Amino acid sequence: FFSRHTIFASNTSSLQITQLANSTTRQDRFGGLHFFNPVPMMKLVEVIKTPMTSQKTFESLMDFSKAVGKSPVSCKDTPGFIVNRLLVPYMMEAVRLFERGDASKEDIDVAMKLGAGYPMGPFELLDYVGLDTSKYIIDGWHSLEPNNPLFAPSPLLNKLVQEKKLGKKTGEGFYKYK
Protein backbone atom coordinates (compact mmCIF):
# COMPACT_ATOMS: atom_id res chain seq x y z
CA PHE A 1 0.00 0.00 0.00
CA PHE A 2 2.90 2.37 0.70
CA SER A 3 6.11 3.03 -1.15
CA ARG A 4 9.11 1.18 0.25
CA HIS A 5 10.57 4.63 1.01
CA THR A 6 7.67 5.64 3.27
CA ILE A 7 8.64 6.48 6.85
CA PHE A 8 6.17 5.59 9.59
CA ALA A 9 6.02 7.53 12.86
CA SER A 10 3.79 7.54 15.91
CA ASN A 11 2.97 10.48 18.17
CA THR A 12 2.25 8.34 21.25
CA SER A 13 4.14 8.76 24.50
CA SER A 14 2.27 6.05 26.37
CA LEU A 15 3.00 3.08 24.08
CA GLN A 16 6.42 1.71 23.23
CA ILE A 17 7.51 2.72 19.73
CA THR A 18 9.46 -0.55 19.44
CA GLN A 19 6.27 -2.58 19.97
CA LEU A 20 4.49 -0.57 17.28
CA ALA A 21 7.44 -1.02 14.92
CA ASN A 22 7.38 -4.78 15.56
CA SER A 23 3.93 -4.92 13.94
CA THR A 24 5.41 -3.77 10.62
CA THR A 25 7.72 -5.35 8.08
CA ARG A 26 9.74 -2.13 7.86
CA GLN A 27 11.05 -1.65 11.36
CA ASP A 28 14.05 0.29 10.03
CA ARG A 29 11.65 2.96 8.69
CA PHE A 30 9.67 3.41 11.92
CA GLY A 31 10.27 5.97 14.67
CA GLY A 32 8.53 8.26 17.09
CA LEU A 33 7.59 11.91 16.62
CA HIS A 34 6.10 13.08 19.90
CA PHE A 35 4.58 16.56 19.53
CA PHE A 36 3.20 18.53 22.48
CA ASN A 37 -0.20 20.19 22.88
CA PRO A 38 -1.19 22.66 21.75
CA VAL A 39 0.87 21.66 18.70
CA PRO A 40 0.75 25.06 16.93
CA MET A 41 2.22 26.78 20.01
CA MET A 42 4.62 24.21 21.44
CA LYS A 43 8.02 24.16 19.74
CA LEU A 44 9.34 20.85 21.07
CA VAL A 45 9.15 17.47 19.37
CA GLU A 46 10.78 14.35 20.79
CA VAL A 47 12.25 12.13 18.06
CA ILE A 48 12.40 8.50 19.13
CA LYS A 49 14.84 6.03 17.66
CA THR A 50 14.21 2.36 18.33
CA PRO A 51 17.04 -0.19 18.14
CA MET A 52 15.79 -1.03 14.62
CA THR A 53 15.30 2.53 13.30
CA SER A 54 17.89 3.21 10.61
CA GLN A 55 20.15 6.23 10.94
CA LYS A 56 18.75 7.54 7.64
CA THR A 57 15.18 7.32 8.97
CA PHE A 58 16.19 9.01 12.21
CA GLU A 59 17.89 11.86 10.34
CA SER A 60 14.82 12.24 8.11
CA LEU A 61 12.59 12.53 11.19
CA MET A 62 14.92 15.16 12.69
CA ASP A 63 14.96 17.09 9.39
CA PHE A 64 11.16 16.89 9.07
CA SER A 65 10.77 18.25 12.60
CA LYS A 66 12.96 21.24 11.80
CA ALA A 67 11.17 21.79 8.47
CA VAL A 68 7.82 22.17 10.28
CA GLY A 69 9.33 24.71 12.67
CA LYS A 70 9.94 22.51 15.68
CA SER A 71 12.99 22.05 17.90
CA PRO A 72 13.70 18.30 17.93
CA VAL A 73 15.38 16.41 20.74
CA SER A 74 16.48 12.79 20.51
CA CYS A 75 15.53 10.05 22.93
CA LYS A 76 15.63 6.27 23.10
CA ASP A 77 12.37 4.33 23.35
CA THR A 78 11.95 4.61 27.12
CA PRO A 79 8.58 5.03 28.90
CA GLY A 80 7.47 8.65 28.55
CA PHE A 81 10.55 9.65 26.57
CA ILE A 82 12.04 12.81 28.15
CA VAL A 83 9.30 15.28 29.07
CA ASN A 84 6.59 12.88 30.25
CA ARG A 85 9.12 10.64 32.00
CA LEU A 86 9.94 13.63 34.23
CA LEU A 87 6.51 15.29 34.23
CA VAL A 88 4.22 12.37 35.09
CA PRO A 89 6.15 11.29 38.24
CA TYR A 90 6.23 14.99 39.28
CA MET A 91 2.44 15.20 38.96
CA MET A 92 1.96 11.86 40.74
CA GLU A 93 4.19 12.93 43.64
CA ALA A 94 2.04 16.05 44.00
CA VAL A 95 -1.03 13.80 44.26
CA ARG A 96 0.75 11.67 46.88
CA LEU A 97 1.64 14.80 48.91
CA PHE A 98 -2.03 15.76 48.85
CA GLU A 99 -3.22 12.20 49.62
CA ARG A 100 -0.96 12.10 52.71
CA GLY A 101 -2.28 15.47 53.87
CA ASP A 102 1.15 17.11 53.64
CA ALA A 103 -0.24 20.14 51.77
CA SER A 104 -3.41 21.28 50.03
CA LYS A 105 -3.67 21.01 46.27
CA GLU A 106 -3.99 24.80 46.11
CA ASP A 107 -0.78 25.33 48.10
CA ILE A 108 1.09 22.74 46.02
CA ASP A 109 0.01 24.51 42.81
CA VAL A 110 1.00 27.95 44.14
CA ALA A 111 4.34 26.61 45.43
CA MET A 112 5.29 25.13 42.07
CA LYS A 113 4.21 28.22 40.13
CA LEU A 114 5.91 30.76 42.39
CA GLY A 115 8.77 28.65 43.73
CA ALA A 116 9.74 26.67 40.64
CA GLY A 117 8.48 29.09 37.99
CA TYR A 118 6.14 26.57 36.37
CA PRO A 119 3.30 28.10 34.32
CA MET A 120 0.77 25.70 35.90
CA GLY A 121 0.71 23.79 39.13
CA PRO A 122 0.61 19.98 38.98
CA PHE A 123 -3.12 19.76 39.80
CA GLU A 124 -3.98 22.40 37.21
CA LEU A 125 -1.89 20.47 34.71
CA LEU A 126 -3.49 17.13 35.60
CA ASP A 127 -6.93 18.67 35.06
CA TYR A 128 -5.77 20.17 31.75
CA VAL A 129 -4.27 16.89 30.47
CA GLY A 130 -7.22 14.83 31.71
CA LEU A 131 -7.22 12.56 34.73
CA ASP A 132 -8.19 9.59 32.57
CA THR A 133 -5.21 10.22 30.29
CA SER A 134 -2.85 10.56 33.26
CA LYS A 135 -4.23 7.36 34.82
CA TYR A 136 -3.83 5.51 31.51
CA ILE A 137 -0.19 6.57 31.29
CA ILE A 138 0.71 5.73 34.89
CA ASP A 139 -1.12 2.38 34.71
CA GLY A 140 0.78 1.48 31.53
CA TRP A 141 4.13 2.38 33.03
CA HIS A 142 3.24 0.54 36.25
CA SER A 143 2.55 -2.62 34.23
CA LEU A 144 6.00 -2.30 32.60
CA GLU A 145 7.83 -1.58 35.86
CA PRO A 146 5.59 -2.72 38.77
CA ASN A 147 8.32 -2.23 41.38
CA ASN A 148 9.14 1.35 40.38
CA PRO A 149 7.64 3.61 43.08
CA LEU A 150 7.50 6.53 40.62
CA PHE A 151 4.87 4.59 38.67
CA ALA A 152 2.70 3.54 41.63
CA PRO A 153 -1.03 4.07 41.06
CA SER A 154 -2.90 6.66 43.14
CA PRO A 155 -6.10 5.72 44.99
CA LEU A 156 -7.36 9.31 44.70
CA LEU A 157 -6.69 9.52 40.97
CA ASN A 158 -8.38 6.14 40.46
CA LYS A 159 -11.42 7.33 42.47
CA LEU A 160 -11.80 10.57 40.50
CA VAL A 161 -11.57 8.72 37.18
CA GLN A 162 -14.12 6.14 38.36
CA GLU A 163 -16.45 9.03 39.27
CA LYS A 164 -15.93 10.49 35.75
CA LYS A 165 -14.30 13.60 37.24
CA LEU A 166 -11.69 13.84 34.50
CA GLY A 167 -10.67 17.50 34.72
CA LYS A 168 -11.52 20.47 32.53
CA LYS A 169 -13.17 18.36 29.84
CA THR A 170 -15.89 17.18 32.26
CA GLY A 171 -16.07 20.35 34.36
CA GLU A 172 -14.52 18.75 37.44
CA GLY A 173 -11.33 16.98 38.40
CA PHE A 174 -9.11 18.16 41.21
CA TYR A 175 -10.83 21.53 40.71
CA LYS A 176 -14.34 22.50 39.57
CA TYR A 177 -14.77 24.41 36.29
CA LYS A 178 -17.77 26.36 35.00
Image (tube, rainbow, N blue to C red):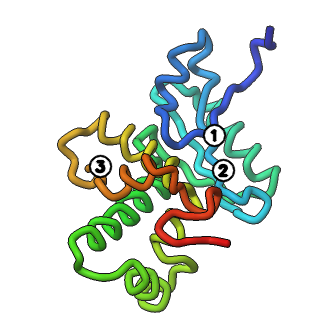
Q: Is residue 99 above or below residue 110?
A: above
- Name the residue: 45% across, 42% down: 136
Answer whether labels 1 and 2 touch (C-beta < 8 Å).
Answer: yes
Badge 3 density bin: few <14, some 14–19, many ≥20, Cα 10 Å: some
Q: Which mark, residue 48? A: none
* Residue 123 pos. (x, y %): 46, 70
Q: Nearer the viewer, residue 82 or 102?
A: 102
Position of the C terminus, as image quadrant, is bottom right
Position of the N terminus, as image quadrant, is top right
Q: Which mark, residue 35? A: 2
Q: Nearer the viewer, mark 3 or mark 1?
A: 3
The residue that label 3 is drawn on is: 153
* Residue 5 pos. (x, y %): 76, 18
Residue type, label 1:
Asn
- Name the residue: 72% across, 60% down: 38
Q: Is residue 1 above or below residue 109?
A: above
Q: Secondary structure at mark 3?
A: loop
* Residue 144 pos. (x, y %): 31, 34
Residue that protrudes farthest toward the left in the picture? 147
Residue type, label 2:
Phe
Badge 1 density bin: few <14, some 14–19, many ≥20, Cα 10 Å: some
Badge 2 density bin: few <14, some 14–19, many ≥20, Cα 10 Å: many
The residue that label 1 is drawn on is: 11
* Residue 130 pos. (x, y %): 55, 55
Q: Nearer the N terminus, badge 3 or badge 1?
A: 1
Answer whether labels 2 and 3 touch (C-beta < 8 Å).
Answer: no
